[in-house]
Amino acid sequence: MSMIDNGAANAHNITQILQAHPEFSTFNHYLTLTHLASEINSRLTITVCAVDNAGMSSLLSKHLPIYTIKNVLTLHILLDYYGTKKLHQITNGTSLAASMFQETGSASGTSGFVNITDLKDGKVGFGAEDNDGKLGATFVKSLKEIPYNISVIQISSILTSPEAEAPTPGPSQLNLTELMAKKGCKAFADLLSANGALKVYEDNSDGGLTVFCPIDQVVKDFMPKYKNLTAGGKSSLLLYHGVPIYQSMQMMKSNNGGLNTLATDGAKKFDFTVQNDGEVVTLKTKIVTAKITGTVLDEQPVAIYTINKVLLPKELFKAALTPAPAPAPEADAPVAPDSEAAPNLTPDGEPADTKADDSKGSVLIRSNGGKWVSVILGVWLVSLLVV
């Protein structure tokens, strides 16, 4: 019986393990993108040192090509089992663990080894052997342990290694603005070029990039608000429409959740949420909900999609979270049943179902046909009592 249990335990799936922890979605994504996930799943004994989304930002900010990112991540995959208990019982307090980077042959000497040291106060430090002995990361917690098959642990930050981060060849850069312009997003492309934000997009294209382009008419209608932003605000808004990972349409249709953007900077989240309903994918900020309307490009490592609204981050548009109340309708001139008069809007731009008007004693009610009707409150209540 125990042999059967051990055999079942060996069938681990790192992608599924990390999917239970959304805060590691970026790390999980890059394991898939670099095909390291399948490598991990094929191993009998392995330890994965995962870094959360915030920790991954330090790696992505270096704008390394995808092949170099793969080298860095292989340094976080140890070819031995290190569960919580073993980490705190390291012989002589220090151990050198061989990583998958060492196994690839790309690492010279001992640069592919990771130094694991049991520190004071119950802490455990991690550092790449070629990083001058610096223990730049510490053990945070265990995410999943299947002794002695796979251990998935969280460490505080990316392991820094000059050898792993050495330049490697990458794909040639695409002409992003030309692609956007051909698919009805020339206005947005022109803003990127004029602002200088385009370089940030180009720097991320090798390592993984997803762009959400508002179509020309949407940008044209938004320009009065755009011109009122500060120079820094304009840059943040443009960078808010880019995500520093590749997201295929299929990935977005099958996975809901938050995404950091190119504008994300420490405490300034500048994130939004991807939501899907069948074939419809929407991007929801605290201010507005935009729908993906088309695909400009979807070829790893770059994806570009058109959207029907400008994405508004709460960091720049906080006032929109509390919209002004709609003007009250005149008591002697109620809105006709077939009127298109709009009620006040909720923060994400969707109409509220009812709106009370205390000053006039009336209320706006949505009819079966979707119209808005003003009803004198007292008359409406009497009619209900009669019925």
Image (spheres, rainbow, N blue to C red):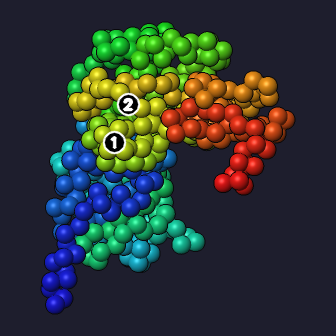
Residue at 72%, 44% in the rendered image:
380
Quadrant of residue 162 in the image? top left
- What label sits on residue 292 in the rendered view? 2
Circle 2 packing at 10 Å, graded few (<14), some (14-19), many (20+), is some
Quadrant of residue 354 in the image? top right
Which residue is at the far right? 359
Q: Gap in Å between the C-alphas at discs 2 and 1? A: 10 Å
Image coords of residue 213 (percent x, y): 41, 22
Query: Looking at the image, which is closer to me, 218 or 107?
Result: 218
Whether residue 201 is situated above or below residue 181 in the rendered picture: below
Residue at 40%, 34% in the rendered image:
244
Please, what secondary structure does the residue beneath circle 2 have? strand
Which residue is at the far front? 386
Whether residue 162 is situated above or below residue 215 in the rendered picture: below
Looking at the rendered image, the quarter that the N terminus falls into is bottom left
- Figure disc tally: 2
Query: Looking at the image, which is closer to me, 371 or 31?
Result: 371
Query: Looking at the image, which is closer to me, 292 or 33?
Result: 292
Q: Nearer the viewer, mark 2 or mark 1?
A: 2
**344 relative position to 246: left or right:** right
* Residue that numbered label 1 is attached to: 252
**105 relative position to 234: left or right:** left
Please, what secondary structure does the residue beneath circle 1 have? helix
Residue at 75%, 23% in the rendered image:
333
What kind of residue is marked 2? Answer: Ile
